[in-house]
Image (cartoon, grey):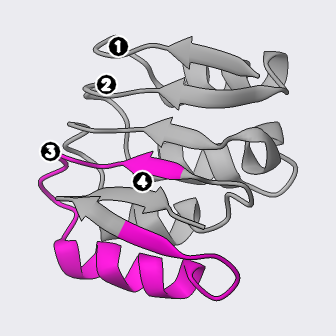
Amino acid sequence: MIDFRLAGLDITDATLRLIIRHMPLLSRLDLSHCNHLTDQSANLLTAVGSSTRNSLTELNMAGCNKLTDQALLYLRRISNVTLIDLRGCKQITRKACEHFISDLSINSLYCLSDEKLIQKIS
């Protein structure tokens, strides 16, 4: 299990590509308050062939204000997710989070335990 905390840093998509390439066993990633991250960043983390698509279990993108509801469509691809923190992401709606949870809850049970904090409960 590899935990990588980059909260508040000037992380770009180029940085994410390096992380994906060189940290194939990454399971917990804290990108909270990284203000340059966009929906495309979520797409990179979850793209076909991306190691993080299968290895990530926890992703913190709280306070990443450029993320929109579109990011949730990409984050749905993470196969082993147990926690996604999107608190403070002003362009992500609660309705989109609820829809995200209903899509994920086919095989496992997820809940919205706090405003935009998505957790697996079974």
Boundaries of the magenta span: 83-111
Q: Nearer the viewer, mark 2 or mark 4?
A: 2
Residue at (60, 29) in percent of width and height: 28
* Residue underneath mark 4: 39
Q: Which one is in front, 101 or 33?
A: 101
Look at mark 1 in the image and give the residue it sits on: 10
118 up-or-down from 10: above or below: below
Q: Which is more N-terminal, label 4 or label 2?
A: 2
Mark in the foreground, 3 or 1: 3
Work out how far the residue at label 4 is from the one at label 1, CA to CA, in angstroms: 16 Å
- Counting from the top left corner in percent of width and height, residue 57 is at 65, 43
At horizontal 19% and vertical 49% (from top left) the residue drawn is 89
Left/right placement of residue 71 relative to residue 63 reads: right
User: In the rendered image, which residue does mark 2 sit on?
Assistant: 34
Query: Could you tell me the amino acid type at mark 2?
Result: Cys
**Proximity of marks 1 and 2: CB atoms separated by less than 8 Å:** yes
Q: Earlier in the sequence, mark 1 or mark 2?
A: 1
Residue 88: give its label: 3
> Between marks 3 and 4, how big is the CA–CA gap?
15 Å
Q: CA distance from mark 3 to mark 2?
A: 12 Å
